[in-house]
Image: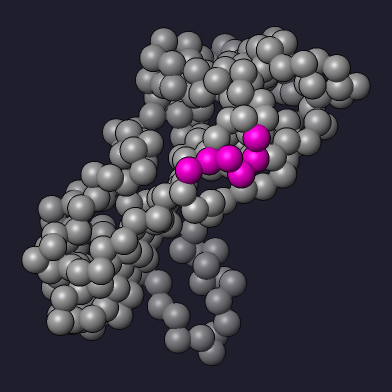
Amino acid sequence: MIEQARQKTPASSNIEYRQAPAESLPFIEDGRVDLVVAGQAAHWFDYLPLFQELRRVVRPGGSIAFWGYKDPVLPGHPEATGILHHYSYGDHPDLLGPYWSYGRAIIQDNLHAMQPPEDDWTDIQRIEYEPGRSAPGTGRGTMLMTKTLTLEQVLSYIRTYSAFHGWQQAHPEQRAKSDGGAGDVIDECAEKMVAADESFRQSADWRQEEVVVEWGTALVMARRRE
């Protein structure tokens, strides 16, 4: 990813790329950072050493902003959403649940495990959204992430989950129908979603049926004390 970023960055730019753990940034001088951001990564951090390092590198008055999102919800399709979440988090080894990394539970809880120490940080804010299932826009909080997709695109998105790749390694004999196989866990999930939802069942091609997708999201912000 860093190599791709360098290729897409103009030579005249003052952007510099470094690879390092968030908890150890020895190439940054004390108090030199104005803003630290992380997108869909903060649930992997070790918070005690992280905030020790941020206290060192962020200047007084500087800011942090950590953002993350969890699972797609299909508002207006509650039964299908429930099936999708069962296949995503059910603890049976034939489902995806056992293959998530440890940090997934943190993002599932909207980054509440991340608590900026109040001795060092002020103006601590949390902006969250929890989608509703009855209809689009019926969730709680401030919506940050929504998109209209076909059901096929939703299922293709689920295949990008790290848990799905872990499931594939544990079930090499099961191949997706689109790859000429008899079907995998996502194909099985899709069949049950369609069977449970009348609008999908009645569609001439359920794969191209458009749905509004909303994601539960969390944004944690704070300012370094002066």
Residue positioned 24% across, 44% down in the render: 113
Residue found at the far left of this picture:
119
Residue found at the far right of this picture:
204
Q: Is residue 49 left or right of residue 126?
A: left
Q: Is residue 27 visible?
A: no
Residue positioned 41% across, 78% down in the render: 16
Q: Is residue 202 left or right of residue 21?
A: right
Q: Position of residue 197 (x, y in %)?
A: 72, 17
Q: Position of residue 7 (x, y in %)?
A: 57, 71
Q: Is residue 215 left or right of residue 113?
A: right
Residue 155 higher or lower than 7, as above or below: above
Residue positioned 26% across, 59% down in the render: 22
Magenta: main secondary structure: loop
User: Is 175 in front, or is 78?
Assistant: 78
Instruction: State which region is magenta.
Output: 135-140
Task: Please state, as top left, top right, bottom left or bottom right, where the C terminus lies in the image.
Answer: bottom left
How is the protein colored in the picture? one colour
Q: Position of residue 176 (x, y in %)?
A: 67, 20
Q: Position of residue 66 (x, y in %)?
A: 36, 59
Q: How many marks?
A: 0
Q: Is residue 32 visible?
A: yes
Residue 109 higher or lower than 64, as above or below: above
Q: Is residue 166 left or right of residue 158?
A: left
Q: Is residue 9 magenta?
A: no
Residue positioned 72% across, 44% down in the render: 148
Residue found at the far bottom of this picture:
12
User: Is 107 in front, or is 166?
Assistant: 107
Residue 146 higher or lower than 158, as above or below: below
Residue 120 higher or lower than 144, as above or below: below
In which image quadrant can residue 156 be found? Answer: top right
